Image (cartoon, rainbow, N blue to C red):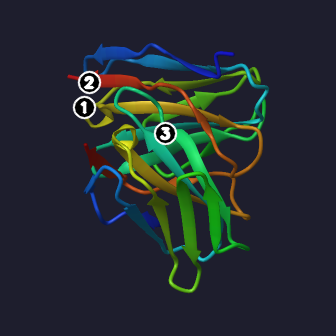
Amino acid sequence: NAGVTQTPKFRVLKTGQSMTLLCAQDMNHEYMYWYRQDPGMGLRLIHYSVGEGTTAKGEVPDGYNVSRLKKQNFLLGLESAAPSQTSVYFCASSGQRGYGYTFGSGTRLTVV
Amino acid sequence: DQQVKQNSPSLSVQEGRISILNCDYTNSMFDYFLWYKKYPAEGPTFLISISSIKDKNEDGRFTVFLNKSAKHLSLHIVPSQPGDSAVYFCAASGWNNNDMRFGAGTRLTVKP
């Protein structure tokens, strides 16, 4: 049972480049989330989804877009990367609202 | 605004002693509280939770206490072990939203 898988694990982007982070879960969870972790800031919610075909904004959505075309996948896109988006990105899923999330192992993104 | 606050960035305790990690929240709509543990290069893992209808929840060496009037919760680890050394995140969610808010984390070091 893989749980939540994030790809890639590491990436270096140049300012202005675009990329997509992929999150896949095999637990048939309805809820999926993208967080970013920055020193001293904890985990901040970027976007989330409460089911296939739905997305919603979190605390820090600017500069990011998401899609949930399939229940098991949640994609996070950066259209034009900025150095402020240098962070560790975590995807999580949950079977019920508010219950303990299952997190992926993270993607470390550096924008230069 | 940071609705969940962990004011101690770090804590160091001796093996066998008690570790007490603290968390404060500002949103009175939160009704479910969780603690996550995070090792380096891994995603956070769910540790223990408590509903707002309770004031204590225990799971082995881990106990979470909730003081709703003070909007404060704490995690007690007794006895502390070197393997408990990690970053601990406090999190909260409310009945009226679909996401979870996290604190900045406390780095616990348990010395042998």
| Amino acid at dot 2 | Val
Residue assigned mark 2: A111
Q: Are marks 3 and 2 on the same chain?
A: yes
Circle 1 SS class: helix
Circle 2 SS class: strand
| Amino acid at dot 3 | Tyr
Q: CA distance from mark 1 to mark 2?
A: 5 Å
**Please, which chain is the residue tagged with disc 2 on?**
A
Tag 1 and tag 2, C-beta contact below 8 Å: yes
**Residue B67 versus residue B75 in the image, above or below:** below
Q: CA distance from mark 3 to mark 1?
A: 17 Å
Residue B108 spot, x, y in % from top left: 31, 50
| Amino acid at dot 1 | Pro
Left or right of A109, for residue A35: right
Mark sitting on residue A96:
none
Residue assigned mark 3: A35
Q: What residue do we see at 60% from left, 77% from top?
A: B28
Q: Label 1: few (<14), some or many (≥20) within 10 Å?
A: some
